Amino acid sequence: MWPKPVTEGPSKTIIEKVLAASHDAGVPSGFGFQSLQFLANIGMFIPFGFFLALALTRGRVWGAASATLAFSGAIELTQELFLPDRASDPWDVVANTCGGLIGLGLAVVLCHMVKVRDRWVVARALYFDARGA
């Protein structure tokens, strides 16, 4: 949460270069700053949702989803109340929440894969132990 918008100062040059490189690589010219910002907000919250889901117990997945929404809303509220040069945007809450949900989903899938693998490893160990191998 920078006190000034990222479209000012040195960040503006970086954003322009990223967009120019994207367009040169074949990304449609309609993909501009708003689209880039939306995707960046999604990417920024994927780790948040992922690690939050891992930190909570299995039955608290919806709590993690709610926490992602609440945290994102708190960030936007803070921008609105305490950072007058910044503009809070409801689409940021949407993008952040989507990113958190993607991270949450990845964590759930990973935990399921580990659980299946662990069952297989234990079953295999028991099978070979019973045969004295």
Image: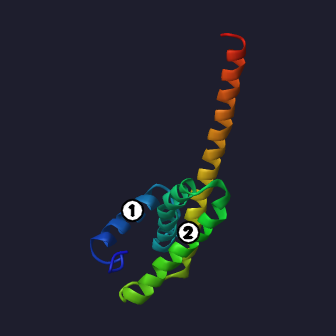
Q: How many marks?
A: 2
- The amino acid beneath tag 2 is Thr
Which residue reaches farthest left? 10
The C terminus: image quadrant: top right
Q: Position of residue 85 (x, y in %)?
A: 35, 87
Q: Position of residue 72 (x, y in %)?
A: 51, 74
Residue 96 falls left or right of residue 33:
right
Where residue 127 sits, quadrant-wise, is: top right
Q: How far apart, in angstroms, are the residues tagged by discs 1 and 2?
A: 28 Å
Q: Is residue 66 above or below residue 131?
A: below
Q: Which residue is mark 1?
A: 18
| Crowd tier of the residue under label 2, counting other residues whose Cα lies within 10 Å: few below 14, some 14–19, many 20 or above | many
SS at circle 2: helix
Residue at 40% of width from left, 59% of height from top? Answer: 21
Colour basis: rainbow
Where residue 13 sits, quadrant-wise, is: bottom left
Residue at 47% of width from left, 63% of height from top? Answer: 44
Relative depth, front residue between 119 and 26: 119
Q: Which mark is residue 68?
A: 2
Residue 27 falls left or right of residue 117:
left
| Crowd tier of the residue under label 1, counting other residues whose Cα lies within 10 Å: few below 14, some 14–19, many 20 or above | some
- For the residues carrying marks 1 and 2, which lies nearer the camera in this image? 2
- The amino acid beneath tag 1 is Val
Q: Position of residue 74 (x, y in %)?
A: 49, 79
Residue at 67% of width from left, 58% of height from top? Answer: 59
Residue at 55% of width from left, 77% of height from top? Answer: 91
Q: Is residue 89 above or below residue 59?
A: below
